[in-house]
Every structure is written in structure tokens, then in C-alpha cells.
Image: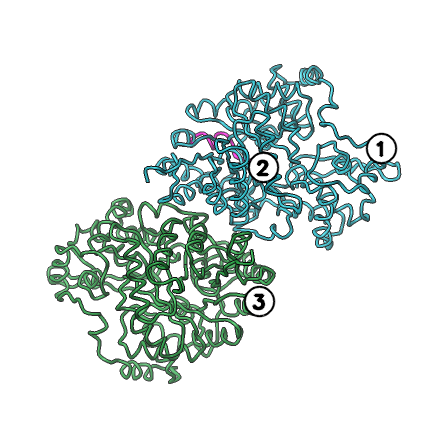
Chain colours: A green, B cyan
Amino acid sequence: MSEQRKIDVTELALRDGHQSLLATRLALEDMEPACADIDAAGYWSVECWGGATYDACIRFLNEDPWERLRTFRRLLPNSRLQMLLRGQNLLGYRHYEDGVVDRFVGKSVENGMDVFRVFDALNDVRNVEQAIRAVKREGGHAQGTICYTMSPLHTVEGYVQMARELMDLGSDSLCLKDMAALLQPQPAYDIVKAIKEGVGEDVRVHLHCHATTGVTLVALMKAIEAGADAVDTSISSLSLGPGHNPTESLVEMLEGTPYTTDVELERLLPVKDHFAAVRPRYAKFASNILGVETEIFKSQIPGGMISNMESQLRAQGAGDRVKEVLEEVPRVRKDAGYPPLVTPSSQIVGTQAVFNVLMGRYKVLTGEFADLMLGYYGQTIGGLNPEVVEIAEKQAKKSPITIRPADLLEPEWDKLRAEALSTEGCNGTDEDVLTEALFPQVAPGFFATRPEGPKNVGTDPAQAGEGGGGGSGPDAVRTHIKYEVTVNGTSHVVSVDPA
Amino acid sequence: MSEQRKIDVTELALRDGHQSLLATRLALEDMEPACADIDAAGYWSVECWGGATYDACIRFLNEDPWERLRTFRRLLPNSRLQMLLRGQNLLGYRHYEDGVVDRFVGKSVENGMDVFRVFDALNDVRNVEQAIRAVKREGGHAQGTICYTMSPLHTVEGYVQMARELMDLGSDSLCLKDMAALLQPQPAYDIVKAIKEGVGEDVRVHLHCHATTGVTLVALMKAIEAGADAVDTSISSLSLGPGHNPTESLVEMLEGTPYTTDVELERLLPVKDHFAAVRPRYAKFASNILGVETEIFKSQIPGGMISNMESQLRAQGAGDRVKEVLEEVPRVRKDAGYPPLVTPSSQIVGTQAVFNVLMGRYKVLTGEFADLMLGYYGQTIGGLNPEVVEIAEKQAKKSPITIRPADLLEPEWDKLRAEALSTEGCNGTDEDVLTEALFPQVAPGFFATRPEGPKNVGTDPAQAGEGGGGGSGPDAVRTHIKYEVTVNGTSHVVSVDPA
């Protein structure tokens, strides 16, 4: 067993772990005590920052997300810090002009970020180009990301092609990202194997899986057998359900195999105990998905997306039409060229399916769905349904585009900076400008209350037993989304708010 | 993919599923509505009977266990019914004479049982001989069982040897039984592979794993790759934690692999929904183990056993000495020849470890531990510590034995029958005699209240939120256990009651 191959491990507890299980509400002060052990445990990297954590910091926790990053940098001096970046969207919900992308990446590296996992919800490589280049220029580790989904058009060869394109952009490594726990063991094996054979044995492949369906620890095993270099897990006390596979189980799973990790189980014990003690304080934000859910394999519709659509239907007095909507989703997804169903595409497709059922198929398009059909989010893998594209063109009064969406944008940094500086409480730093740019509706409130300091929203478990967090699962609407709906030339505004 | 190998599946929900998760309290009436779908879903067998369910029927549910069996036979006409049998202990807590074993097996087959999984807590094959022969004679399916455990003396070769012995007894199949979720993927692969190579490719190997440590679905995968014929799972809504891997995840895990099952996911959906709806009614009996626990790999001590020992220590005002006891357990287990830690050996070893810490090492032996050291439970794999055997001989005033323990027993059916017939409420059937014989302390009360009919102990979830079930986990003491402790010739009686 002297020839064991070392598998690198990324710990997710500080970002996606609590994002998936506790609606991203974990306060920095409830993570700090675990940092010394995490730093010494032997991880390849520690994921600790991303769009939802940034959002939650300023929206719910009155924490400066940049201060959080600097704190992690200080408390995890020996660890690679890792973040999830939504390509050209950065951490926001629209495309930003390339100069803003450069600024954001620059500031992130300056504040301590090491590894940037860059993805696009449509798997449009053009949407991650600028971010990957910026990361390389700043000396960071750029991880090009493939969102895993299933459709008649998604093939192993297609994923290999995307892997090749991401490596050609200069990525330091690849991530196969399975945000819906759909990655079964055999495709995990096949894709990783094919990437290694087709793109290069020395191409680092990382695997990110959620645990929802119960099969993905097996997928990690098969991916490792196929040559995967690194896998993502979360400490057991912040794992499973819509979260991730437990770090300790991953380590134990490899016992006796030709694979091993550098993770020391002894150091994980206090980390586990810490989060086991903290977690009950966030019970009211807890996902109401318990155990496993495997129906997603059939429906392809993530659980959180279903509860979202149910809320929308109930709000329209049509709570009895869920089944029709569930049957409509695959059709809408097909018409849109089989986008992966992940934020924001899951909301866009889901809401359009609701509209189709309530108002007749494509009688009314949401502004977002029209944009999706017209290429303003980028390209999906499949052929768009030309009839629906035509409807979109008419309703939105826009032409379809085939260029990279961000190419339509003018330089905007100076404008964003001016807007931020005019906001009360803005401290004038580029970091604050970015906060304003990414979350223009939330930033002003945060700037105003920032001097009051962080607000821990955890509560004593004895008072917190008020049941699940409703629609606060990983796919719930997290921000106010405004749809512009144009019917026969008349514009309507439809709002969807966080549950 | 036309060459896919079919993997058989045993559904555990009706026995070990609720035994592990709901302290065996599930009422028959809460299982009946799921039977039609289970019967049609394509399982190889449906486990539905065993020692703890029999015990719980008469102790808590006022249900006749034989009537339960006949009901399952009626509601599952197309399914193999399967039970777990503790070898020469049958479903009780002592060795029974061979004639009683024959009667029990005969009556079980007559009432509808098909598959008998026969195990011995010490892996002493002599303790399963009689039961396996009886099953064969009655036309049932005899499954010889290997309890999986880890120790310096347990080797793949040793398991293969045991497999060979079980097949030589006439077993129709083998089960590798991992009651503590200790079976990691590599040993799962190695043992199954070695059995297939060493005993025969056509020897059916079934795999039973609990889910506690989070790694055993991967173990099922690797065992299947090594040639395993069948695996045990439980419907997702009665799975995970100290229970088992979810049936739906097993089926989805195999998608695209060279393996498949006959299980139809469509038929599982109503089964899942049914138990999801029923489960909250049993919240007060629910295991307090959530998520995964991997420390057992280090300590080898099942979680339920730890909470048991903690109760014992607290009762002695020594709650602060848990750590010493945890360190003492491996020593006691070694001295006893590395028995698997499963009921009743886990209680016997655990209690002796408590005694050693409180009163000095082996100053006082429990009657059970003395019996274990003197061979009255059968043989363990390892060499017993001769010094401790000597202490046992002195304290218990008994000589060590090397013969099969049941060979010491005289025919006892007539006596047991007479005892039963003299008990008020006994209906004179052999089934009632067996109930009296197996649970002499519980049967009289059951016979007295039986006319009142089954008692459903589930409660409205709104009233049931009184927290975890304390020591009601799978390894908790379930019956009143009386230890005779002899110190310097003076006998003391020590009692342990269910938590």
C-alpha cells in the first residue's frame, strides 16, 4: 500500500455546507472557533466565500463580507481559501462588464482568496472566460467548472469538450459540479475517465456533489477510481440531506483502498463537535428536506425548485395545479435548450412553467425567460425551439443575440463607483463599491447599519423549535426578483420575493 | 447493456428499518397499507420478523407476533418473507435445546416464513447448525450468516473459512451481516470476492449493512462489483442514521452500471410516502443518532452501547468515568477473544468494562461475562486470556466447556409446554408455548391482555415532540437483564433494565 494515490479534499462547512443546510445564516463568530482545527486538518482547500454567503452577510447578518474574508485569511493561515464565482455574474444576478470582473477578482485576491471556482449556469464557457483570465493575472488558482446535468443532449463527449475549452482558457484545474445530486456513480466514472484520457492525465479534476439523492458518495468513489484528484465534503455535523457527503465518511471510505487523504480524523473531531453544538441554534433556518430524495432523477426538478413553484401557485390560488406544472417543466427546459437547473436558470424555467399552466403555454413570457430564449444569458447546449424564440422576440421587442452577452456592456466601473460613493455609509473603498454593484438593493441598508456590528441570527434551541424554514432550501428565491411581463404590448411587473 | 447482472434486493422497512430507527415500535396496522406496493415492487424478499419485533409485539404493542406473521403472509402473497434468527437462541436470550429449535422453525414455516437468516453473535458455527438443518428439513431457505467485525485476528481468510463451514451445513445462501456499519468498501469487496473464489461462484452472497457511518452504500457497490448477489436496503423514509441505506438510492446508484435490479421505483413511491407520513407518529421512540457517526471505526464501540454504559455509570454516580470505560472496552473484548459487538455480546462486554473501571479489573465478573469466558455462549475467534478464564472459573464455580453449549441441554419441550399451559390466557397452541418459552417474563402479561387487541403506541406528532428516545437506540438494553455477581464466594444480583 506504499503506492496509495493521495486524494485532495476541500472542506465545505464554511460556505456550501451551511448554505445548503442552514439557509446561509451561519455567523462568522460561530465559525471562528473551528478554524484552527480546520487549518491543521490537512485539507487541500477550505471553501468559505461565495454569492449566497456575501448576500446573507449584508442582508441578514450585518457582516461585511470582505471582513469575513480577511478574518478567514487570518484564522486559516496555512489553508488555501476557496470561493465560488458565478462567472460574468460575479456574486450578483446580472452580467457585469469585464472591468468590474477584473476589479472584483483583484480585490478578492488582495483580501486573501486563493482558489476561484468559476461557473456559468448555462455552461457557456464565454461567460467564465474573463473571470478565469483575471484570476490567472492576479496569481490565483482558476478552477474552470462544468455544471453537471442530464438531458438527451448531454453526453460524456460534450463534457470532455467543455473541459478542453476550460483548460484552453488557462484553468489550473477543473471542477465537475453536481449541484442537484444527480451524478450517479457510472457517469461520474465515465466523465472523469474521459476527461483524463481526452484532455490530459495531469489535468486536475475536482468533484463537487450534493448528497440529496444518497448516491453521490458512491459517485465520489467511482470518480476517484477514474482518476479524480480532489473531492468536496463537509464535516459530518454539517452534512447530508441537501448538503454534502461527510468528510469523515470520505476518509473512512478510502481505508484499505489504493487511495488515501491527508486529512487527519483526530483534527476533525473538535470541528464536528463544534458544528454539532452550533447547528441547533439555526434550527429555524434548517432545510426541511430530511434523509434522501431520489425523485429528482425522474423529474429533473430540484426539491427547492418544486417548493418555490408551489408557493407561486398557491399565491395565485392554483395550489392544485402542481402536477401540471411539474409536467410542464421538462417541456420548458427542452424548449430552452436543456439548461442545467441551477440558480438562476431553475427559477427562470420554473416560473415560466407556472406561467404556461396558469395563462396558456407561452401566452406570457417572463422577462428573464425571454432573455434566456434570446441569448442574453448566453448559450444553452441544445437547439432553442424557434417558435418560442419568435414569441420571445415579439413580447420582449428585442432581437436574439449570439455574441457573448457581456460584449454588449459598456465600461461601468466609474458609474458604479459614483453610485456607491453617493450612498450613505459607503466607506469609499473598492470593496464597498463592489458590494453596492453586486447588491444595489441591499447595500444601502447594510451600509447604514454596518456600524452596529454583526448580528447573530441563531437562537437558543429551546425557543427555536418552530419547525422547518419553509421555502428556505438551497433553491429558494433568495432575492427580490422582478419579472417584466409583456402581453400584447402591455407591460406588467411580477415580483417574486424570498419565501 | 443487455448483459446486466441482476442484483436482488431485500426490503428491511418492516423489520430492521423500524427496529433501528423507531425502537421496533411500528404497529402492524401502520405497515399494512404499504404491503400491496411492497409485494409488487420486485423485491427478492421482505424482511418482516425477528427477535426484537417479536419481543416488541408482546411487550409494547399487545400484538400476537404469530398473527403478525400470518398477516404479512396474507398481504404479501407474492413475496418471500424473511426473518432474522439468533441461531440456538432463536428469538430469546438463552440457548434452547434442539427440539425447541425444530419446533420453532417448523411453526414459522407453517405460518408463512420463507427465508431464515441464521446468525450467532460469536460467529460460532455450532450455534447455527441445528437451526439451519431444521430450516432445510421444513423446506425453507436457510441463509448462513457471518457477523462482520474488525480485530487483529479477523481476516478475509477467516471469513472465507466460516463461509465454507456454513455452506457445508447446507445453507442455501450466505449473508455478510454488518450490524455496526463498520464494513468499508475495500473489505466488502475483498471478502465477497474471496468467498466467490474460495467457496464457489454460485454461492449466493447477501449483504446486510447499517448506514451509521455513511460509507456502507459504497460498500454495497463494491460488494456488487465483487459478485454479491443480493443486498439489503430500506425504503428511503425509513432509512439512514442507525438504519440502512435507502432502497431508492441503491436502485439509482446502479443506473448505467453493468448491474440492475427488478425493483420498480414507481411502486416504491407510495411506500415511501406512507412511511414518511407514519414516522412522525413514532418520534418519541426515534433514535437520537442523526446523520453519520464515524468514531466507531476508531473505538469499535457502537453508539448505542456507549449510551448504555453511560447510563450504567451515571446510575453508579460515576458519570465522569466514561473515558476510562471506553478505553477498557477494547481490552475486555481482547481478553474475551474478540467477539463481534452485537446483542448480547455488546452488553456483556460493555457491562464488564464498567465493572472493571468501578471495582478494579476483573475483581467482579458478571455472570454473563464469566459464562462467555468459560465457553457457555460458544467459542470466539481468538484465544481467551487464560488468567481471566481462571478468575471466571473461580467466581462462577463452573468449569470451562469446549462442547457446543446446547449439548448440555436436556429435551425441554414438554416442560416448556406444561409451563405455558399453566399460564392464564395461553391458548394451548405451539405458537403460544413458543412465546412463553422465548419470553417467560413477558408472555404472561401478554396472554392476559391479548383479548384487548393491538395497541398502537404512535402518537400525534403535535404531542410527540418530547425529544429523542434516550437509550432506546438499537443497542440499548431491551429486556430486564439480571447479572449474578459472585465476589469471594458471596453472590450479588445486579439488574440492568431497559432505558
* B353 sits left or right of B117 in the view: right
Q: Residue at x 55, y 37 (%)?
A: B176
* A123 sits left or right of B357 in the view: left
For residue B160, which numbered disc appears in the image? 2
- Residue kind at label 3, given as amino acid type: Asp
Q: Quadrant of residue B347?
A: top right
Tell me if I can see residue B344 in this picture. yes
Residue indicated by mark 3: A37
Are there few (<14), some (14-19), or many (20+) residues within 10 Å of tag 2?
A: many
Mark 2 vs mark 3, CA separation in Å: 42 Å
How far across and how far down the image is residue A37, in percent?
A: 57, 67
Label 1 SS: loop
* A383 sits left or right of A302 in the view: left
Q: Quadrant of the N terminus of chain A?
A: bottom right
Frontmost residue, B473 versus A256: A256
* A99 sits left or right of A60 in the view: left
Indicate whether B442 appears above or below A430. Answer: above
Q: Chain of mark 1?
A: B
Tell me if I can see residue A237 in this picture. no
Mark 1 vs mark 2, CA separation in Å: 37 Å
Q: Quadrant of residue A490?
A: bottom left
Residue indicated by mark 1: B397
Q: Which residues are magenta?
A: B23-34
- Residue kind at label 1, given as amino acid type: Lys
Label 2 SS: helix
Frontmost residue, A387 versus B183: B183
Closer to the camera: disc 2 or disc 3? 2
How far across and how far down the image is residue A494, in percent?
A: 23, 61
Are there few (<14), some (14-19), or many (20+) residues within 10 Å of tag 3?
A: some
